[in-house]
Amino acid sequence: MAGNSVYYITCLVAVLLVVYFGPNFKARKAWSRIPTHTVEDAEDGQLQGDEDYLIASGYRKYSKINEVFKIKDPTGKFRIILPLQKLEEIKNLSTQILSFRAWVRERLHIRYTGFPDRAPWSAKTLRHDVNRNLDQLVGGMKHASTISYRVASKIGILLRFSHWLFLSIARLTTQNFLGPELTNDPEWLEVVMRLNSNALAAASDISAYPTYTRPWASYFIGSIKRIKRDRALAMKKLEPLFHQRMAIRNDSSLKKSDDPLQWMLDNAGPTLSLAVFVDTMMRLMFASIGTMTITSTVALIDLISQPQYTAELTQEIHEVLNGSEIHIEDLEKLCKLDSFLSESQRLTPVFKLVNREVDQDHTFRDGLYIPAGTQVHYSSYAIATDPDVHASPMTFDPQRFLKLRQQNPGSGKRYQFGTVTAENLAFGIGTQACPGRFVAANAIKLIFAKLLMGWEVKWGNEEPVKRPEHKYTRSTIVAPLKYQMLVKRKDGCGPGILQHV
């Protein structure tokens, strides 16, 4: 009898070991076939494992000859860097196989922090309904982006880049996706402006704990408590609007609003709950406001640090807009501004990598096997600064993309700000490219047009001697918060982006 007990216990342990270690063994076997790039393998080995440097040198060593390589991140996990040649195969993969959403969940530790996740109908609405009706959004964006300040007409006012743009873009994004009701609500705006800092702080705080303790530790971490408080406040703010619009949606005798909020509700299916709606809208605000603010801030820093380009851009804006109502086709005619923004993003993207996580085991056509749970990336920054892709790649050329459009007249929108190509992956890749990129691109152009039409802009009290370099951590830009600008209204011009009060 005792022998049987030992036999059964041994079998149970064996089964548990196979269940636990089997997938890991398969993953380790797959990873072992992919070369690991370390600082010792790099050209000079000076930067002691700096991740951005490792990826750039790995790109030159492996990606340029169509080979996959991997690096080990600070947590000890392997990250796979794919070569550009796999782009055609990967860009049409289902989101069930290759997922940006899964990568965000893992990066932000959503299972522990409680940071809002999104439902898939938001991306569908952006990709189809919103992108087909961009002109409809421009009027609302024009008014919502204006911020009121007390501005001394002769002296001007000092503004911190990031805060002014954060507020302007928070209002503009709220107008786009929720309508005008909350664009001037200070509590709502504070909630959405805290989303990025809360998400990153909570992810950093929870990652300091061993995995098995995180479910309990999450109850005591201040940044996670802030996320929960802000979610409750967002629920309170959005509940009346949700019930009002759902009543209209569910009653065929009532006339629906023709706007992005109603399109999202229509796409959400019959069983949409308030909680799912609030979480999805908060995630939409998180994704939109953070990346748009940083992209705009970097571009504005690029402009002020290179003032020789201001007059030409301002002249184009006045010639195209000419004091008339702004429409989407007008923004598309701002070719020099478009090129300037594209060049700024090329040299200083929000992310230096295209980030995805494999949700299901996948085998490429050449036999490369990637197990589920693996993070895979394209080195988008290395591609954008490759001398085989762009001449003088580290030189800021504000007309680089304008010249490409002129040299390739049949290229359509290939070289426009917001368009995704193999050489320009700043907004993502394939079916999972940022669905709101055209809204973002036109919103940023609108902000710059309104600013340059009515205001003189120069450095505040901390003028750098040249175009500043920006810091990155784990291939993600650190928001440039310290810079200030001095703005002064031009003689004879209307308020533009800032309202004189």
Image (spheres, grey):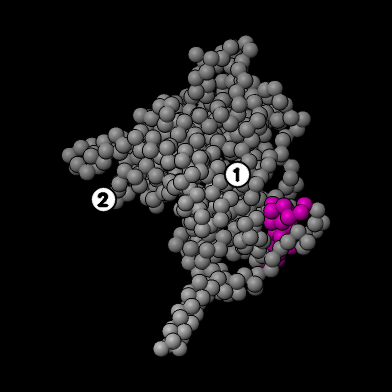
Please state if 192 lies on the left or on the right of 62 as rendered. Answer: left
Label 1 SS: loop
Q: Which residue is drawn at the image coordinates 60% and 23% (left, top)?
A: 159
Give me the residue at 64% from left, 57% from top: 73
Q: Is residue 157 left or right of residue 274?
A: right
**Does the magenta run of residues contain 40?**
no
Relative vertical location of residue 42 with respect to residue 252 in this rendering, above or below: below
Magenta stretch: dominant secondary structure: helix
Q: Residue at 19% across / 41% down in the picture?
A: 251
Q: Is residue 187 left or right of residue 151?
A: left
Looking at the rendered structure, the number of numbered marks drawn on it comes to 2
Residue hosting label 2: 270
Residue 349, position in %: x, y?
Answer: 62, 44
Displayed quadrant of residue 249: top left
What is the number of the mark on residue 350? 1
* Residue 32, visible in the rendered structure: yes
Q: Quadrant of residue 70?
A: bottom right
Residue 176 visible: no
Q: Amino acid at mark 2?
A: Pro
Percent x, y of residue 54: 72, 56
Reply yes or no: does residue 49 show up in magenta: yes
- In the rendered image, residue 388, in percent from the top left (x then y), is placed at 72, 55
Stretch in magenta = 47-67
Task: State how far apart marks 2 and 1 are (Cα).
Answer: 36 Å
Residue drawn at the location 71% of the way across and 63% of the way down: 37
Query: Hey, what amino acid is under mark 1?
Result: Val
Q: Residues within 10 Å of mark 1 (few under 14, many from 20)?
A: many
Position of residue 99 relative to residue 173, above or below, is: below
Along the line of sight, which residue is nearer the eye, 23 or 468? Answer: 23
